[in-house]
Amino acid sequence: MYTRSTSVKYEFGDLIRQGSSFEGLRVTKPIEFDLLIPIILDDSTEVVEMEEAPGYYFIYSSDDIWQKCIIDGMLSPVLMNRRMQAVVNDAIVFMKAQLPGYDIKMRDQGAAKRLRVKHGDVTIDIDLVPAVKLQGGEYLVAKRHHRADHYHSMMPLADNIFNHIWRMSYSEQEKEVINRMNEVHRACLKILKAIAASDQHRSQFGNCQFADKISVITCTYT
C-alpha cells in the first residue's frame, strides 16, 4: 500500500485489524476499531532491545524515505506518529472529496491517531498505530514508555532516551490464544468485558482494557 504526503511516496504493509470487533468479542455496538499500520523499512534496519526496559526496542535505520523520523540513527516513535498525522491528514482531504456527506476528522488518542468518521447518526472511531514488522513476524508499535516525556504534537523532543524506544506488540499471540478458546471460555470473557464496561463497575475495574482478557486466559491456560 502506498500513500503520498507532499512530495514523498511512503510504502506501508497491509493494515492489521485488532480488537474485539474483529475477534467476535465485542459486547457493545461495533463503533471502535483498531488498526496497525506496518511501516516498510529498507535492509539497513536493525533492532536492539533496551536493557533497562524489557519488551521495548531501539530501531536503527538509515532508510532515506523516513529520514525525518530518524534521530541519531534511531527511528523515533514520536516523530513517526507526527509524520503519520501528516500522512493521514492528506488522506482525509482525498477521502472527503470521494465521500460527500461524511465528516472525517483526526484526533490524538494516547499513542494512537484516532480517525473519527460520522455519517448521519452513526459515529465510528478508528485507532491507527504505526508498527514495524520484525523478521520473526512480531511487531513493534509506536507506543510510549511510561518514562518517556509527555509531549505535545509540535514540541521538540527532550534529551530522554526513553522517547526513542518502540514497544513489542503481543496482539498476534493474543489472537492465537483467543482463537483456541472454546465457546464457554469466550462467553465468560464477554461477560467480564460487559461488567467492566458498565458504568456501575467501571471504577472498580479501572480503564485497563486487557484486565478481562488476562483473567480468562490465565484461568484457562495455567
Image (tube, helix red, strand yellow):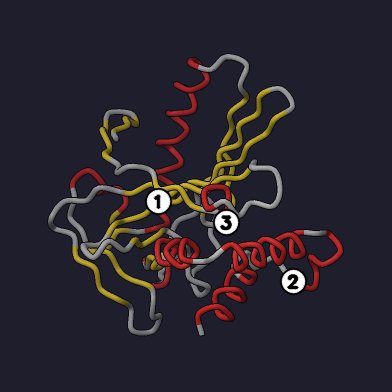
Spot the residue most to the right.
Answer: 200
Question: What's the residue at 59%, 51% (across, down)?
Answer: 109
Q: Which amino acid lies under the numbered mark 1 shown in the image of this protein?
A: Pro
**Quadrant in which residue 216 is drawn:** bottom right
Task: Please give the residue where the numbered disc 3 appears in the rendered image.
Answer: 110
The numbered mark, 3 or 2, whose residue comes first in the sequence reads: 3
Q: Which numbered mark, 3 or 2, is in the foreground of this view?
A: 2
Residue at screen point 43% across, 37% down: 86
Mark 2 lies on residue:
205
Q: Secondary structure at mark 2?
A: helix
Q: Upstream in the sequence, badge 1 or badge 3? A: 3
Judged by depth in the image, the label closer to the viewer, 2 or 1, is: 2
Structural distance between the alpha carbons of marks 3 and 2? 20 Å
Image location (x, y in percent) of residue 151: 53, 59
Q: How many marks?
A: 3
Image position of 28 (left or right of 134): right
* Quadrant location of the N terminus in the rendered image: top left
Q: In the picture provided, is 33 more to the left or to the right than 180?
A: right
Q: Secondary structure at mark 1?
A: strand
- Residue 54 percent coordinates (x, y): 38, 80
Label 3 sits on a secondary structure element that is loop
Separation of residues labelled 2 and 1 (CA atoms)? 28 Å
Name the foreground residue: 158 vs 50: 50
Q: Residue at x 18, y 60 (%)?
A: 45
How packed mark 1 is, by other alpha carbons closer than 10 Å (few <14, some 14-19, many 20 or more), is: many
Query: Where 53 sits versus 42, above or below?
Result: below
Q: Hey, which residue is sitting farthest left in the picture?
A: 43
Residue 130: mark: 1
Left-right relation of 115 to 78? right
Disc 2 marks a residue whose amino acid type is: Phe
